[in-house]
Structure formats: structure tokens, C-alpha cells
Amino acid sequence: MGAADVVPGVSGGTVAFITNIYDELIESIKSCNLVALKALFQQGPSAFWQHINGNFLLCLFLGIAVSVVSLAKFISYGLEQYPQFVSAFFFGLILASAWFVYRQIPAAKGRLLWLLGGVAAAIGIGVIHPGQLTVTPLTVFLSGALAICAMILPGISGSFILLLMGMYEPIIGAIKSFDITIALCFALGCACGLLAFVRVLSWLLHQHRAPLLALLTGILLGSLSIIWPWKALGDLQDGHGSMVTAANILPWQSEMSLAGIALCVLLMIAGLLLVLGLESISQRKQEQQPESY
């Protein structure tokens, strides 16, 4: 999840979903509430830890933190030096994830409309031109609160939301340079946003699961246009000056060599196979779990 959250266009929530820990993640975070604090003071740390599913959350968030810190430089370098290859790999991953999420949608009327709405929303977000916020503790905190809501949703990239606000480079730069002030403000914003948003998300999963999953499937499919590896760059003139734009093109219309196109296709297949592998492992573990009891 940490590795996925670093890449604009990819959501850590997607990884949680395809590994079948998504519902447990939402409910565990939701349990961090006043009842948990009451258990802490009245019954002790052990009851509190059990109430919030502490072992699960600790392992998960430690894994995310280690991945973000250790892979921030690597993925940032990959996006700068080999953006098409990185995009190709995650294109395959997202495509397979969309199929996986679609298969989980319960039979319900109107799910196609929700799916198409998700596609339209993702494409609309993709054509929005990035803005630029001034980097202050308050804007970093608010950026974290907004980005974490996207990060926890399958198909919506928190990193891409940061990119739209012009906060992606400052946050990644702070992580790479261990800027404690910026990193702490961002982490606090993420924590507050997550605790507030997860209750809405839990309600939607229980009460409107089919429309929600259909919408998220559409967002996944629509986000493929954002992460498509082959793009033609251009300049857009507006009232604020010149802005670089990128339009999707066919592989053979790009300047990439045949070997490069072939490598992109292989990386797409690798992304597909990774999701299928994760799904297979998760299903085997679920089948074996009742036997362990």
C-alpha cells in the first residue's frame, strides 16, 4: 500500500482491496473512537489494543511507513527517469484491479450507471490542470487530510490529489530529506482526515456496497487514461502563463523504440500477473483459515 500511495494515479486502497484486507482495515480504523479510550482507562491497555485490532493496524501502518520512506527516492527517481515504464507497470496493475473490484459488486440495479459515473469522474479529474498551494504547516495539514481520503479509496490516488494541489513535490521532498516539521504536519492531517472519513466509508460499505464498488470500478477504469504510458506533450497558454499538457497517443505514434514499446507491454503484463498472484495467495489463505481454528 505504501509503494502504491507514492505513485500518482495508483491507490493504496486498491492494494488493500485485492488482498482482501479492505473491510478489516476500515472497521479497525473506525474502532479508534471514544469507546476505545473508555476501554483504555477502565479495562487497561490490553482491552484497548484488542478493541482497535492493534496488531493488524500496527503491522499494516509500519509496513506503509517503511515502504514510503524506503521507496520514496526509488519511485521518485523512476518517475523522473523512466516514467513510461513505471506507468506501464501500474497500468497493468490498475487494469487487473478494476476487474477484481468489478467481480465483487453485488447484483443491483443501476450499477452500470454508477460505473460510468466513476469513469467520467476519473477522466474529469485527469484533465484538471495542477494548481499550486503555498507550503505552510496549515496547507500541508489540510493536504494530508484530503489526500488520505483518496488514498483509502480503491481507485483514487492520494498522490494524484496532492499533484493537483501542487503539494506532491514538497511532500515527497520532505520525506526524502527527513523534514520533520512538514512530515509531521502531513501525518497529523492524514490521521485526522482518516478518522473522520472512515466512518462515512464504513457506512457506505454496509448500506450501499454495490453502488460504491461500481463507482470505484469506474474510477479505476477512468484512471487508466491518467497513467497511460504514451503521451504527447504540449504547451497551454492561459492567464497565468504557459503550462505543459499531456495527451494520450498510440504507442507507435510516440518516439519510443520498438524495444521500449515491447518492454512497456511486458511491464503491463507483469502488473496484471502481480494482481492475479496477490488474489490467488489471498484466496488460499482464506480457504485455509477455517482449518486453523
Image (cartoon, rainbow, N blue to C red):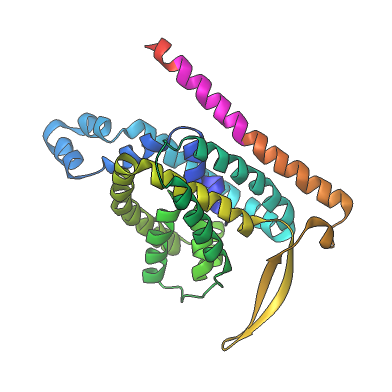
Q: Is residue 278 magenta?
A: yes
> Is residue 165 placed above or below 22 in the rendered structure?
below
Q: What stretch of residues is rendered in magenta? A: 275-288
Q: Is residue 180 magenta?
A: no
Q: Residue furthest left?
A: 42
Along the viewing direction, whichever of 235 and 213 lies nearer the viewer: 213
- Residue 86 percent location from the top left of the image: 69, 51
Along the viewing direction, whichever of 117 and 110 lies nearer the viewer: 110
- Residue 31 percent location from the top left of the image: 26, 40
Along the viewing direction, whichever of 275 and 58 lies nearer the viewer: 275
User: Image check: 242 left or right of 106?
Assistant: right
Task: Look at the magenta stretch and give its main secondary structure.
Answer: helix
- Residue 203 percent location from the top left of the image: 28, 45
Q: What residue do we see at 48% from left, 48% from top? A: 112
Q: What residue do we see at 77% from left, 45% from top? A: 265
Q: Residue furthest bottom?
A: 239
Q: What residue do we see at 49% from left, 62% from top? A: 161
Is residue 157 among what the camera can see? no
Q: What residue do we see at 38% from left, 38% from top? A: 25
User: Image check: 164 left or right of 269?
Assistant: left
Is residue 248 among what the camera can see? yes
